[in-house]
Amino acid sequence: MSEFLIVHYKPGQQSSMQYWVMGGGQHPSITLGHGSLEDLQAIARGKKVTILIDAHYTTLESVNIPSKNRSKQLQAIPYAMEDSLAEDIEDTHFAPGRADESKVPVIAIKRKLLQQTLDIFKQQQIHVDTITADSVALPGSSKQWCILLDEDSALIKTGESQAHCCDRQNLVVILQALLYQNLTAPDSIRYYYKENDTEAESLLADIDITVNAQSYKNHALEIFVVNLNQSQPINLLQGEFAQKRGDNTWLQPWKSVAAVASIWIILQLGYDSMLASQLEVKNQLLSKQIEKEFKRAMPGAKKMTNMKKRVERRLNELKFGGSAGNKNGFLQILSKVSPVLSESDRHKIKAAVYRNNYIDIDLTAKSLQDIEKIKDKLASIPGIKTVLSTTVEKDSVSGRLRLEAKG
């Protein structure tokens, strides 16, 4: 049996990388650990190496390309994804997967970053067979979204080939914005978070969609390994980055690898599964009784989700005569200022961060006057307080707009 090494790689963090190893032989061994790039040199010897690059450094999208001709698809993909990329398409490497009808899944990454990654591992004499985005190995569909939360960030999968990244503190705001943008909400959300993360357990309590929560023991790589074989493989090492050594048809061996990994994860969660089975009948009876009382309290309700929060919210509305909502929220501020921000092509928005009832927007323009015009127009909007700070560079001007609701 072949031996495999899977590395979860965050660029710039070569001193501590998570890895998963499956040894060969009649009794294969499995190891989940972390170490430096130098430590991996000995571990990688004789193994097929796969690198999962952190999703913050890649873009995963499903692109609509009418043509089934592969060469025409490769020509059209960069221009179809241009608006969703922060970098110029000339500086970006595009790796398409297998097309589904007119949809083509694509991973985009900075060409310079991909080359640096290969060079770093090559310096340690580690031959890399496959590089892909970790978001590819996260399950998700339009009917069941998936969220993976770690200590610093969150990865949201809204389709088989559609992923979004954000800081942990902005997860709820970004998730609500994505739900608002989509015409059809998912039936449920699969939610992974680290064991004993008490904050994570209640983070999605106010989301009015069924949330199926599951914890992982040590590292998100546990989730990626189990789902990697079930996902559509997209190897970034194609085109100009295609590797010369060996054959890149790496999917076949993963069936046995994923099976062993699944057994290992199931054993870790065995006690919880057994306990859940014993309580299943009792929980069903209790759930029916709760739903019955909920329908009596709220006869117009269509979904039996977040019943406690919804009843408490309804009681507060009856007590205080209704609630006008949070006028200072992200979407409320954004709805007022977005017409001004989108009416001109003389500036580019680089980032937007929402916290404490205000939005910080980083943008660039060719001249200070362009940014001042935007600021003046925003300041004239009723109910919006605007603060501008700028930095003048050689060929452009960078600015930060702070937008805050008055009152």
Image (cartoon, grey):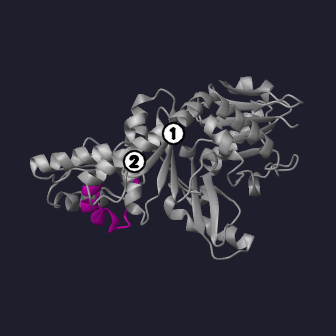
Is residue 14 visible in the rendered structure shown here?
A: no
Left/right placement of residue 274 relative to residue 352 reads right
Q: Circle 2 sits on which residue?
A: 288
Q: Which residue lies furthest to the bottom in this view?
A: 66
Let me know if residue 195 is in the magenta part.
no
Q: Which residue is drawn at 67% across and 76% down?
A: 67
- Percent across and percent down for residue 253 are 82, 45
Residues marked 1 and 2 touching at CB (< 8 Å): no
Count of marks placed on residues: 2
Left/right placement of residue 150 relative to residue 313 reads right
Q: Toward the viewer: 108 or 329?
A: 329
Position of residue 245 relative to residue 193, above or below, is below
Q: Which residue is drawn at 78% across and 52% down?
A: 242
Left/right placement of residue 169 relative to residue 232 reads left
Label 1 is placed on what type of residue? Glu
Q: In this picture, which residue range is highlighted in magenta?
A: 331-353
For the residue carrying disc 2, how many other residues have a C-alpha within 10 Å: few (<14), some (14-19), or many (20+)? few
- Percent across and percent down for residue 187 are 47, 57
- Percent across and percent down for residue 293 are 29, 48
Position of residue 57 relative to residue 269, above or below, is below
Q: Circle 1 sits on which residue?
A: 280
